[in-house]
Image (cartoon, rainbow, N blue to C red):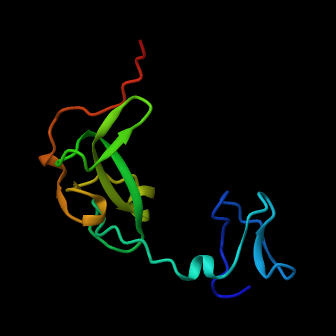
Amino acid sequence: MSKNSPEFCPECGSTNITYSDDFDEYLCRNCESMWDDDYYSDEEPLDLGACCACGKTEKVENILTINKRAPIPGTGWSCVVCGLPYDGAVTVMCDDCVVGNKEPKEVCYGYVKDKKRISYTALSEEEFNHNFQHE
């Protein structure tokens, strides 16, 4: 396997991956998906900015929803099932803070890709949560 060989299947998440000489591609033995070395080589590293709990920028790969209104309406999470608009607050965290169950000190201000932050305490106290009551 080359330096770009995958550690897990991008389709199903399995680690049961082998290289197929017949097809010159990788094969997932669980879901039988196939892809080549270039599948991963062109990927840009995920850059979500600083962790909203500790401030570090390494391994910040987790986007979490908060049950409060986003500081800027239309830039947060939503739900197509219960009809919520894109108004829920979002925070990003590094792997260590997620594993350590850390509380966020900041939330995203605007879209996650903008990498702007605002203090968690600046959020409105208004709840923003799913509404699964169907008539």
Residue drawn at x 38%, y 74% as measured from the top left: 58
Residue furthest toward the bottom? 2
Choose top left, top right, bottom left or bottom right for residue 23: bottom right
Q: What percent of the width, then of the height, locates residue 119?
A: 15, 54
Quarter in which the C terminus is drawn: top left
Residue drawn at x 41%, y 56% as measured from the top left: 98
Residue furthest toward the right? 22
Choose top left, top right, bottom left or bottom right for residue 27: bottom right
Residue furthest toward the left? 122
The residue lying toward the viewer, choosing from 121 and 80, is 80
Residue furthest toward the front? 23
Residue drawn at x 22%, y 45% as measured from the top left: 70
The residue lying toward the viewer, choosing from 1 and 26, is 26
Q: What percent of the width, then of the height, locates residue 121?
A: 14, 47
Q: How many marks?
A: 0
Q: What percent of the width, then of the height, locates residue 75?
A: 26, 50
Q: What percent of the width, then of the height, locates residue 118?
A: 16, 57
Q: Is residue 26 above or below residue 129?
A: below
Q: Report whether 123 appears left or right of 13.
A: left
Q: Report whether 85 appears left or right of 44.
A: left
Q: Is residue 54 above or below residue 21?
A: above
Choose top left, top right, bottom left or bottom right for residue 24: bottom right
Residue drawn at x 30%, y 69% as measured from the top left: 49
Quarter in which the N terminus is drawn: bottom right
